[in-house]
Image (cartoon, helix red, strand yellow):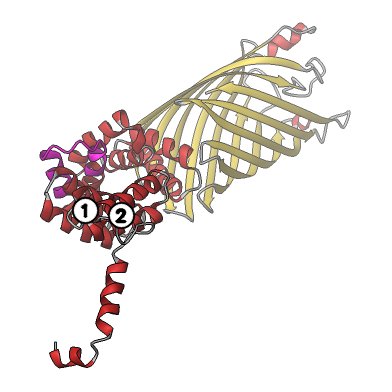
Amino acid sequence: MNPGRLRRFPACLPIVILLLLTLRLPAGADENSPPVQNRDLGFTQGIKAFEAGEYDIAFSRFQQAHLVDPENPEVLIYLVRSAIELRRYDRASTALKELAEIEDSADVQFYVAYIAYQEGRYREAVNGFQRAETMGSEIPTIPFFLGASLFRVADFDRARPLLEKSVRDLPETHPNSRFYLGATYLQQEEYTRAMRELRAVVDAEGDSRLGRTAANLLRQAERGNERTKWWEVSFELGSAYDSNVLYEPETDVVSGEEASYGFGSFEGVLYPYRTAQGHAGVGYALYQSIHFASDDDIVRDFDITRNAGSLTFMAHVLQGVPGVLTGLDYEYSDAHLGGVRYQQTHEIKPQATVIESDITATRAQVVVQDKTFPDFDGRDALYLRPTVSQLFSLYHRTINTAVELGYEQNEAESDLFDYQGVSVFVGAAIPVIGELSSILGLQGRFLDYVHHPDDRTDRRLIVDAGLK
């Protein structure tokens, strides 16, 4: 600095010095007050604002208190905390460096690590949280932040117990800890556990950014779970109402008789081959219905016992969203009606599914059946039923619904048993608890027995509900 320039403006110096001193005074302080009193006033105002969640005001007051007493560690730590709340990590880092020169405490190391975590410097964060823990920091969220940082550096084995502890012991870290734990399970291919944690996050967060990210990971876990399970078993119990207990038009068979019945089913599938590209499986299914009491005892003759064996094949032609799946199923079934051997069927079902979005898909399939009736003349037939279905996943993909439209045509050995018509089906699967779901269905069939002497049209409505 040129001393000569100061001599040229001697009148300016008192004004400049006065302005500099004024800038150091906190709001509401008297310029004649002692520095400690001014610091305490600004600090007290900052504490009140911080506790009220007014972090911008708190930050300003702590800055003023820091100017008065720059080496006070308590002021610096609150300055760091308010800067973090405002996401002003550069200012928080500067204050932390000043604080570290005064006292390198465990809490200082925690906040240094926290800022590194927020800025994406996860390896630094891991080291910082570990130092804070070693130095005896009592900040309870260290296990969560250390676990999250370890996840970010792909150290899933070390992250897992820390995140499990956070979920178990630190509810204040939910749903973030459940998100990271679910993502860790997903990386370790423990899909059932991943789905449990991620579904909880989706339910809690809804359409928030975290909720949407969790929903994406949940879908990955569901797909992983499907492709790694080499077997599936399902049971269903329910009841139904049938507006027309009719199987073939014949003079001695009940027509237009309504009834209710209970039913139970079992289905099991083994998958010798199952990958992300597709699967091949072999299955068995059993179905039994029991009609409830009716004014007409003949209704009881329509109890069905059905055994079926199947082969199923599916391939992902185009993975992801949009995506395309193709499949081919074969099934042989043997049905008894009222305890009497009734129908044997060979069925082939080619199908294709287009996945338009995360929550919608369209499926087209054709059911082709070769039906034989060993003890009934004239009923052997070739049956054809093409259908188109729109599938929906609602409420964060927990409720699955379907709307199906179809055409039916039956070409029998005898003209009496030829029919054609249309059908509609609406169904939903609603989760109850765990793997248990409530199954609801409504089916309508409108069939014309084209060669029947009475030229009769058969209208049939079936409503069923069950637990699966």
- The verdict on residue 177 being magenta is no
Image position of 351 (left or right of 299): left
Question: If the image is split into quadrants, where does the N terminus sit?
Answer: bottom left
Q: Indicate whether 309 appears above or below 239.
A: below
Name the residue located 65 percent from the left edge and 36 percent from the top edge.
382
Q: Amino acid at mark 2?
A: Phe
Name the residue located 60 percent from the left edge and 35 percent from the top edge.
369
> Circle 2 sits on which residue?
62
Label 2's element? Answer: helix
Can residue 272 be seen by looking at this rendering?
no
Name the residue located 73 percent from the left edge and 12 percent from the top edge.
299
Q: Which residues are magenta?
A: 127-146
Can residue 202 be seen by looking at this rendering?
yes
Q: Residue furthest right?
A: 454
Residue 263: image tag: none
Residue 122: image tag: 1
Q: Amino acid at mark 1?
A: Tyr
- The verdict on residue 130 being magenta is yes
Q: Indicate whether 376 appears above or below 357.
A: above
